[in-house]
Image (spheres, grey):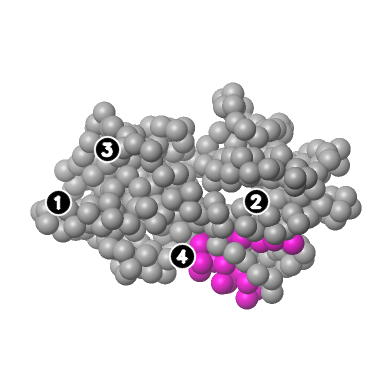
Amino acid sequence: MAVVKHLIATVTNDLTFDRRMQRICRTLAANGFAVTLVGRELPNSKPLDIEPFRQHRLRCWFNKGKLFYLEFNIRLWWYLLWQKADMVCAIDLDTIVPCFVVGKWKGWKRIYDAHEYFSEVPEVVHRPMVKKVWEWVGKIFIPKANLAYTVGPALAKIFTERYHISFHSIRNVPDEATKAPIATETGYLLYQGALNKGRGLETLLTAMQHINLKLKIAGEGDLSNELREMAKSLGVADKVEFLGFVKPADLPELTAGAWLGLNLLENMGLSYYYSLANKCFDYIQAEVPALHMDFPEYRSLVEKYPVAILLMELSPEAIVNAVNTLQLDEPRYNALVSECHQVKKNFTWQLEAQKLLTLYRDIRS
C-alpha cells in the first residue's frame, strides 16, 4: 500500500473562487494525497466551503501593492517553517520564494504551477523595474522545480525553452456535467472572470450601446467601480448586469443560459497573448458559442473545433459587427452550438486529471 504523501499548495488569492485549485486539490485528495491549500483572507472573505482537503488562509494587514506581496511572503515563509510535508507547490511566481527556499531546507519536492506568464501580465509588463524583479525570481527559482506545469501547450513550450526544464500542460477545463444545468434566464451575453485591466471590458461596454442583448458580468476586480460608473455614463446600465463574485458551483447554470460567451483579452503582454482561459472551456461544456480574440491558443482550438468566432481586432465596432452578424445568421450559430455539443467530451477535467495524477505519482515515487 502506497504511503500517503502530504502536499502544500500556495496561492495569494481567496480560496473560495479558485476553481483550478479546487479541482486539482480534490483530485489529489481523492487519489491518496493529503492536501493543504493555503491562500489569503480578505476583509470580505466568506466562510470556506467544506472540501476533502485542508484549507488555510493567511490574514494580512496590507491587501495590495508591494507591501502586500512582502507581507504575504513573510507570513507564508513562517507558516511553512512549522509544517510537515513531502511536497510543496507554488502557484505562480508570487509564492515561489518561500515555497522553494523552505522546501529546499526541509527536503520537500518542489512543484511549480504557472497559471499565467507572471512577468508578462498587464499589471507588470509596462513597469520595467517590477518586471525585472519577477524575471529574476523566475530565473533563479523555476529551474529548481522537480515538476513544472502550466495551463496550455503554448506557454508550456515557451517556459520549457526559457527555463530549460520540462513544462507540462494541464488545461483548466471544467468537470464533465452529470446533467445539463437548467437556466432560469436565457439569451444574454456573458463575461465571467476578473474585472481587471486588459480584459476588454471598457471596449465591451462601449459596444453595448449598439447591441440589442443583455450583458451579464460575473466577477470583481480592480476596475469594478470604474466599470459600473462607465455603464451608467454610456447609458447602458439598464442592459448590463454586474453579478459580483459568483461561486463556482453556480457558474454552470449561469453559463448555460448565455447566448454567447465573451473572452476579449487585449494584447498587453505575452501572458494574455498566449492564454488559454478556463472560460473558453466553460462555454464549450455549456454548449454556448463564444467570441475570442485571434490569439494563438484560441486560433489553434477553433481551426480544429469550430466552436467560436475570432476577432482580429478589439474595438467596439468589431464586437458589434460580430454579435449582430451572428444574430442574423441562425444556421451558423446553430453549427457552432452543434460543434460544442460534439466536442465537449474532449475537454473535461476527468480526462485532464489523469495527466495530473501521472505527474504527481511519478514525483511521489
Gap between marks 4 and 2 measured at Cα? 20 Å
> Where is residue 98 shown, x and y percent of the image?
79, 49
Disc on the earlier residue, 4 or 1? 4
Secondary element at tag 3: loop
- Identity, as a three-letter code, of the amino acid under mark 2: Ile
Instruction: Say if the magenta span includes residue 161.
Output: yes
Q: In the figure, residue 126 lies in which quadrant?
A: bottom right
Location of residue 178 with respect to 311 vertically, above or below: above
Picture disc at residue 91: 2
Gap between marks 3 and 1 measured at Cα? 16 Å
Residue drawn at x 16%, y 43% as measured from the top left: 212
Image quadrant where one finds the N terminus: top right
Q: Nearer the viewer, residue 236 or 170?
A: 170
> Where is residue 356 shown, x and y percent of the image?
59, 55
Q: In the figure, residue 64 lies in which quadrant?
A: top right
Question: Which residue in the protein does label 4 denote?
Answer: 273
Gap between marks 4 and 1 measured at Cα? 28 Å
Question: Which residue in the protein does label 3 denote?
Answer: 257
Residue drawn at x 41%, y 54% as measured from the top left: 347
> Where is residue 124 shown, x and y percent of the image?
59, 58
Is residue 287 among the parts visible in the rendering? yes
- The reply, left or right, for residue 61 in relation to residue 324 is right
**Pointer 4 local density, CA inside 10 Å: few below 14, some 14–19, many at least 20:** many
Mark 1 and mark 4 in contact (Cβ < 8 Å)? no
Mark 4 and mark 3 in contact (Cβ < 8 Å)? no
